Image: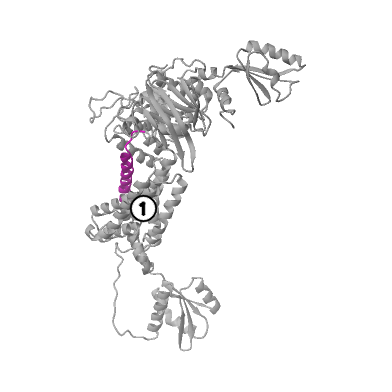
Amino acid sequence: MNNQFEEDREDRNARVEGPRSDEHGSGSQVSNLDSPASAVRPIIGSRDRPIPQSPAHPITRPPGLPITGRWRSYQLLLLARLKEMYREPEVIFWVFIFPILLALGLGIAFRNKPADIIRVALVDGPGAAHAMELLRPASAAGTVKAVLLPAPEAFNQFRLGKYDLVVTPQAGGFEYLYDPARPESVLARSTTDDALQAAAGRKNSVPTSGRISSEPGARYIDFLIPGLLGMNLMNSGMWGIGFALVDLRQRKLLKRFVASPMRRSDFLLALASSRLVLMLLELALLLGFGAMAFHMHVAGSWISILTISTLGALCFGGVGLLTASRAQKIETVSGLINLVMMPMWILSGVFFSYERFPAILQPLIKALPLTALNDALRAAILEGAPLTHQSGRLLILGLWGIVCYLLALRWFRWT
Amino acid sequence: MMQSMDVAVRCRGLRKTYEGNIEAVRGLDLEIYAGECFGLLGPNGAGKTTTIEILEGLLEPTSGEIEILGHHWHTNNREVRELMGISLQETRLAEKLTVYETLELFASFYRRPRPIAEVMAQLALTEKSDAWVGKLSGGQKQRLAVATALVANPKILFLDEPTTGLDPQSRRQLWDVIRQFQKQGGTVLLTTHYMDEAERLCDRLAIIDHGLTIAGGTPSEMIEGLGAHHRVEFDATGIVAGELEPWRALPGVGAIHEEDGRVVLSVREPHETIPALLAAIQNRHGHLLHLTTRQASLEDVFVHLTGRHLRED
């Protein structure tokens, strides 16, 4: 294949043969899978490809010479990042498919469905038949399902979670066994009590009525999608910047780049731009998916959602840059990235509200960048809150970003 | 091959001490003329890579002066980089970019790059233009690494162990590329631990060991500097291991040492020494088991200077 070089074992001044003309003709299009558009690859001197006329550089440049210009390296660096990403199927999966699958899975698991039937174990014995009789209307209405069981079995099954409540008939009344830590158990106690009391003749002293609300905007999926968006911006910022940089460093490509006259600012700018391009896709994909699959309603303006996402992507880009500033091995940086992200996955209200954590932790949780991002995204997407009402959260994101960039600038090693 | 005696690279008193007081380079002086191919030859860990990376402006020397084509790193960083083509040791280029895309990217860093098609043709990569870098063979990857250096249209080429790990054919291909570059007036600095590479490719050499230049000059000068530039290696029955004195009296013998159980004589004129040697063995009622003669090589220069081999496995 490479026989255009004459072997000259002994004669060091042997004439070096150029490539034979028949060898670089049509054979050069080896894999044409991803041959970039002519805008990307305008000038090719080889004879099998015509030289397209580039309007930006009319006739000043001799044919065959690569295009030069102030922003050419930036352009190509950005394109290289994007190409490397879309040619890596794993990246496509983790960045685009995985969040959708997660949203789909959780959206289905926690979809709004009719209230569960309350499962009650009724301890067999005197009075049990009477209790069964009293519960018959509730049973018919489909709210309570009572099963008659011997005492040990009833308690055992309750402990295992098969029943939400154990009712033991006692002289003139009933004893409830329930678990205050299990919401469905608490609900079972009050519903069953209501059913028993009403059947036994209790009259309500105040007339009450209820209306049903399960509008889009207040469902779990509505809570989830902005959270997933925030998490995705964090994930891809950390991996897309932090991991990518250490990978380049480990391959000595960073060193190779700085050995050339490449402007370092072009390189970093291209890296940041590639994040923003990806962010746009992530945003469109997740919100589009929410709207299509779950009829999610986006209340806020696109401008404010875009501004918040951009700030979030840049902030986590900064965190990623800082994580990558010294690590020499991808194993090291993977550990660091997980260390940084893990607490925020749990604390920052991606899957469930952080209000569940103790009050003492709340200020700390609210200072985390992902909490600020998730809160800001939720407020903008679900409530249509204007940016001016979110200045605190945007400030937190901005501060995290700026502090990380400054520290990274100090510590970053190219070699 | 030397076109002028202009100095392309000059360094004086180069020192590099790493944290923990490891002295990688301990006061190196080099003068590389424009248009020559200069080799830094030495065993692994001798300080070759540290030296070349300091000259490339990738490492800060602890002390010493460097001048590249009249420029200094501190004052003219960008200008110097425009003039240099670099191939580092073990760079793994992006695997998911094509050969063309990789060269296009590197070309964009320079103000006056060479046509990409021309560089690909020169390095026999034209057929691989659209192939992903990850799919190339070791030799092709190494040629691509050199192509990223040549696309810069450099005046001076720095190659750190460009042929390490390559098969003989790929090595010769790279040698041809280096000579071609030199014929067009380029200056080359390369490091190697292959003595044959240094001998065939380099106009002048510096042999480096433990961070110091221990010898310098053209390959033939250095070999001739040994005095006796032929080697006669033999083994025979009836001789005592370690007893070298009897052979010193043979005509034309310079130095003697023992290697792998064989006696190695450094001689000026093999045709005078060998008959005398055969006669001496016969006098001792011995039989010759092995006899070879060869030209002295840079390896012998290194052994002579350090008592060690260049590549000790």
Kindly identify which chain the residue marked by label 1 belongs to: A
Percent of width and height locating residue A362: 35, 66
| Residue under the point 46% across and 45% down | A329
Where residue B103 sits, quadrant-wise, is top left
Q: Residue at the location (48% across, 84% down)?
A: A169
Depth check: give the residue in front, A225 or B268: B268
The image quadrant that residue B275 belongs to is top right
* Residue B10 in picture, x, y percent from top left: 40, 27
Q: Image quadrant for the N terminus of chain B?
A: top left
Q: Main secondary structure of the magenta part?
A: helix
Give the residue type that dot 1 points to: Met
**Visible residue check, residue A296:** no
| Left or right: A246 as drawn, with respect to A276 | right
Is-magenta flag for residue A280? Answer: yes
> In the figure, B91 relative to B291: above or below?
below
- The quadrant where residue A223 appears: bottom left
Residues drawn in magenta: A260-283
Q: Is residue A136 left or right of residue A384?
A: right
B6 horizontally vs A10: left or right: left
Up-down: is A303 above or below B265?
Answer: below
At x 46%, y 43%, the residue is B19
Front residue of this view, candidates A111 and A31: A31
What quarter of the picture does the C terminus of chain B occupy? top right
Query: How many dots with numbers?
Result: 1
- Residue linked to disc 1: A234
